[in-house]
Image: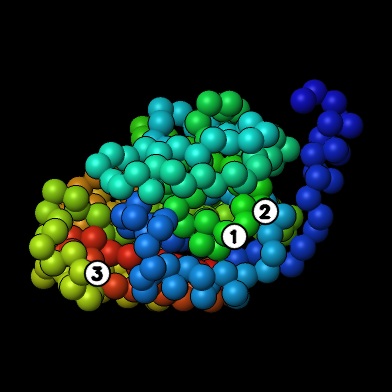
C-alpha cells in the first residue's frame, strides 16, 4: 500500500457512522458457544441494543503473540483451540468473512508499531464463541488483533486509543477474555452454582467493578501492582488484557455499564462491559 489512491480506497471502504459502542465480553467456557444459559441470554440481549456494524475487530485472550498481528485473509477459518469437549463443539463453524481492508487500516492506525498482516490464524474461540450469539448469521466481517505478550498494561491501554477512529467507521471493537480467570483453582463440583466465587474472587470482582464504574482506570492498568486478590484473579495476563483495550477506547462523556456480572465455579467471572 504505497499510493495516495490506495489510502483513499481504504479510508472509503467503511462509511461514516455514529460512534459505535465498545465491548468487553467475558467469554468463559467454550461450551457457551452451544449451551443455553444466562450468559448466552445476556449476549443475545446485548445484540438487540447494538447498531449494525460494518465489521468487527476482536481482541481475544487466545491470540497471545510476540509482536502485534492482525488477520488479513478473506475467509478466516474457525479455530477449535481447546480439547476435551464434546464433538458438537468441534463441529461448530462460524463462517464470517474477514476484511483485508480493515486489517490494512488497522495496521496504518497503529503506526509506528509494526503490525504483521497475518494469513494463518483465523477466528479463535475467544472470538467466535461469543460473536456467534451477537450475529448468528455470520453476516458481519470479523478480524482479530493479537495481544503482544512482551508489553505492559499501559502499552496495551495506549495502543487501543489509536483505534478510536474506527468507531466512527461502523467498526464494533470487542475485547474477549475474563477478568477473574484462575483455571487452576476452578471448583468443577460447583460449576452450575449461581454466582459462586471464593472470597478472593468476590473481593477482586467488587474492587474491579468499583474502579470500572468510577472511571478510575489507572489501578486496572497497573493490575500487577495490586493486592493478593488481584494476583489470584489474574495469575496470567492474557484473559485480562482485552479489558484494557475496551477501556482505552472510552470517551470522557461515554457511559460504562456492566452485564453478565457474575462469578462462576469459584475462580472465574463472566463480567462484561459495554461502553457507549
- Left or right of 167 in this view: 235: left
State the SS at label 3. Answer: strand
Coordinates of residue 270 in the picture (x, y in percent): 33, 65
Depth check: 19 or 224 in front? 19
Choose top left, top right, bottom left or bottom right for residue 80: top left
At 69% across and 64% down in the image, what residue appears?
Answer: 52
Residue behind mark 1: 135
Locate residue 62, reporting x and y percent: 38, 41
Label 3 crowd bin: few (<14), some (14–19), many (20+), radius 10 Å? many
What is the distance, in whole Å, between disc 1 and disc 3 at their CAs?
Answer: 25 Å
Asked if one can make out residue 58 in the rendered structure from this viewpoint, the answer is yes
Q: Secondary structure at mark 2?
A: loop
Tag of residue 110? none
Sequence-wise, the earlier of marks 1 and 3 is 1
Q: Which residue is mark 2?
A: 139
The quarter of the picture where the C terminus appears is bottom right
Identify the residue shown where x is 80% and y is 58%: 16
**Dot 1 lies on which element?**
loop
The tag on residue 263 is 3
The scheme the figure's colours follow is rainbow
Q: Is residue 151 above or below residue 138?
A: above
Dividing the picture into quadrants, the one containing residue 236 is top left
Residue at position x 84%, y 31% in the image? 6
Is the Cβ of the residue at disc 2 closer than 8 Å to that at disc 1? Answer: yes
Q: Are marks 1 and 3 in contact (CB under 8 Å)?
A: no
Question: Camera-side residue: 108 or 50?
Answer: 50
Mark 2 or mark 3: name the one nearer the start of the chain: 2
In depth, the one of 119 and 15 nearer the eye is 119
Left or right: 257 as drawn, with respect to 86: right
Distance, label 2 to label 1, CA atoms, is 7 Å
Amino acid at each position: 500500500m504505497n499510493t495516495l489512491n490506495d489510502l483513499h480506497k481504504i479510508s472509503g471502504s467503511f462509511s461514516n457512522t455514529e460512534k459505535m459502542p465498545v465491548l468487553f465480553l467475558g467469554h468463559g467456557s467454550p461450551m457457551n458457544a452451544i449451551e443455553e444459559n444466562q450468559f448466552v441470554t445476556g449476549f443475545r440481549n446485548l445484540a438487540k441494543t447494538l447498531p449494525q456494524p460494518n465489521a468487527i475487530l476482536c481482541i481475544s485472550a487466545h491470540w497471545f503473540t510476540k509482536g502485534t498481528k492482525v488477520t488479513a485473509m478473506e475467509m478466516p477459518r474457525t479455530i477449535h483451540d481447546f480439547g476435551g469437549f464434546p464433538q458438537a463443539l468441534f463441529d461448530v463453524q462460524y463462517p464470517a468473512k474477514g476484511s483485508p481492508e480493515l486489517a490494512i487500516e488497522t495496521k496504518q492506525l497503529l503506526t509506528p508499531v509494526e503490525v504483521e498482516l497475518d494469513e494463518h490464524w483465523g477466528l479463535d474461540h475467544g472470538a467466535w464463541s461469543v460473536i456467534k450469539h451477537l450475529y448468528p448469521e455470520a453476516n458481519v466481517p470479523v478480524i482479530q488483533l493479537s495481544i503482544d505478550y512482551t508489553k505492559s498494561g499501559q502499552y496495551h491501554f495506549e495502543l487501543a486509543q489509536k483505534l478510536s477512529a474506527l468507531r466512527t467507521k461502523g467498526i464494533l471493537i470487542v475485547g474477549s477474555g475474563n477478568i477473574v480467570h484462575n483455571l487452576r483453582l476452578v471448583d468443577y463440583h460447583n460449576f452450575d452454582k449461581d454466582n459462586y466465587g471464593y472470597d478472593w474472587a468476590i473481593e477482586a470482582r467488587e474492587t474491579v467493578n468499583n474502579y470500572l464504574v468510577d472511571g478510575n482506570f489507572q489501578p486496572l492498568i497497573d493490575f500487577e501492582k495490586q493486592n493478593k486478590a488481584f494476583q489470584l484473579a489474574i495469575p496470567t495476563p492474557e484473559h485480562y488484557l482485552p479489558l484494557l483495550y475496551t477501556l482505552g477506547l472510552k470517551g470522557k462523556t461515554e457511559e460504562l455499564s456492566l452485564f453478565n456480572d457474575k462469578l462462576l465455579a469459584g475462580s472465574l467471572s463472566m463480567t462484561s462491559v459495554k461502553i457507549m
